Amino acid sequence: MEKLEYKISINAPAEKVWKTLWDDKTYRQWTTPFSEGSSAETDWKKGSRIIFGDSSGNGMISKVADNIPNKFMSIEHLGMLKDGAEDFDSDEVKSWAGAMENYTLEEKNGSTELSVSTDITEEYKEMFAQMWPKALDKLKALSEN
């Protein structure tokens, strides 16, 4: 696996960017470049389970590895959801299980620099390299609104 890293400067305080990232309504909006109907079922507390889903019952099963409000969120990806069934053991899952996705917010003079790093397999690298900038542009627009 390799790591993809993205940075974006958002003209809003870290608290607003954080809320936009993880609030259910805005989460569903900024993540549409990844999948229409994106959702996250969780309370975002450290150690909590996350079901990242799409409108067809597919997605990923993850956990909140760390959560420092308005500063840092770390997510560990553990398995897949396919047609509503959980998969932690297939070869496909084993190729990326344990992948991390980290969000770091740093506020400077009322603006927030958001850094995102995510572990990715070669198979999905190009696809996510196109999706992440679109998602972060949506996040920026929602946060600055």
Image (cartoon, rainbow, N blue to C red):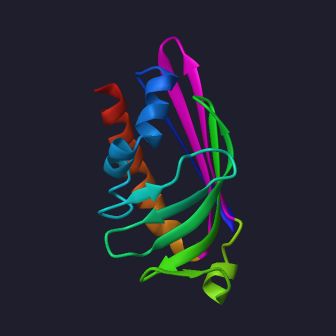
User: What residue do we see at 64% from left, 88% from top?
Assistant: 90
- Which of these two is toward me, 15 or 111? 15
* Relative image position of residue 117 (x, y in whole percent): 62, 49
* Relative image position of residue 113 (x, y in whole percent): 53, 29
Q: Quadrant of the C terminus?
A: top left
Q: Is residue 86 above or below residue 55?
A: below
* Relative image position of residue 96 (x, y in whole percent): 66, 73
Q: Is residue 110 above or below residue 125?
A: above
Q: Is residue 66 magenta?
A: no
Q: Is residue 103 above or below residue 58?
A: above
Q: Which residues are magenta?
A: 99-122
Is the magenta region chiefly helix, strand or loop?
Answer: strand
- Which of these two is toward me, 70 or 113? 70
User: What residue do we see at 61% from left, 62% from top?
Assistant: 62
Q: Is residue 71 left or right of residue 23?
A: right
* Relative image position of residue 67 (x, y in whole percent): 65, 40
Q: Is residue 69 above or below residue 90?
A: above
Q: Quadrant of the N terminus?
A: bottom right
User: What residue do we see at 44% from left, 80% from top?
Assistant: 84
Furthest residue in direction bottom, as rendered: 91
Choose top left, top right, bottom left or bottom right for residue 12.
top left
Q: Is residue 101 magenta?
A: yes
